[in-house]
Image (cartoon, grey):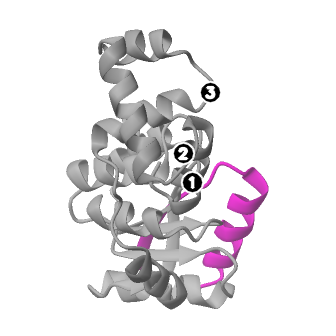
Amino acid sequence: MIRVLLAEDQAMVRGALVSLLGLEPDIEVVGEAASGPEAVAVAREARPDVALLDIEMPGGDGITAAAMIREEVPDCKIVILTTFGRPGYLRRAMEAGAVAFLVKDRPASELAAAVRRVRRGERVIDPDLAAAALSAGPNPLSPRECDVLAAAADGSTVGDIAGRLHLSEGTVRNYLSSAIHKTHARNRIEAVRRARSQGWL
């Protein structure tokens, strides 16, 4: 029996996926979570073989949760599920230790098949997304540029960002300027939008 953790913040979607997986004779859902931190806590307790993690969840995304689960439950295989097939998400997920990346609009039968394949040690990547990720190239933003750009997403002032990230205002301006240039944007709002559309943030 393959023991599975399912983390998805939308209760209806989570319930449907649990029901679908429950129809499989060799798969048992041993834990559910609605947020990144909850997924880590449930994984620590339930010790699943496979964790199915949505990317966009409150309180910490699925990619962050993936890295933490890999650290605390190293035998658990991570499968990322997403509505958003963004190339940058795929790269970040792989760096966090995910072995599979599936877009939610695929047939339900593919999910159970992916669970079995990763349990056997295979990688499962949506082929269209893999091609897009290769053509898009790596994230041009440094980790600190990503931090500053993410902090700017809510319209915070340079002073607010500096205080939150413990940087000088001049340093924040430099990072913002560099991020705007690298994303070929006209301003930081456009830079945030472009970075998000690529899955870099």
Is residue 106 inside the magenta stretch? no
Is residue 16 inside the magenta stretch? yes
Residue under pointer 3:
154
Q: Nearer the viewer, mark 2 or mark 3?
A: 2
Rendered image quadrant of residue 135: bottom left
Q: Secondary structure at mark 1?
A: helix
Q: Marks 1 and 3, Cα distance to the nearest angstrom?
A: 15 Å
Q: Amino acid at mark 3?
A: Asp
Mark toward the start of the polypeptide (1 vs 3)? 3
Q: Amino acid at mark 2?
A: Ala
Front residue of 65 and 49: 65
The residue shown at (33%, 67%) is 138
Q: Position of residue 134 (x, y in %)?
A: 38, 81
Q: Position of residue 96 (x, y in %)?
A: 30, 58
Front residue of 136 and 180: 180
Q: Are marks 2 and 1 in contact (CB under 8 Å)?
A: yes
Q: Are marks 1 and 3 in contact (CB under 8 Å)?
A: no
Residue 118 in view: yes
Residue under pointer 2:
191
Mark toward the start of the polypeptide (2 vs 3)? 3
Front residue of 165 and 125: 165
Residue under pointer 1:
194
Q: Marks 2 and 3, Cα distance to the nearest angstrom?
A: 13 Å
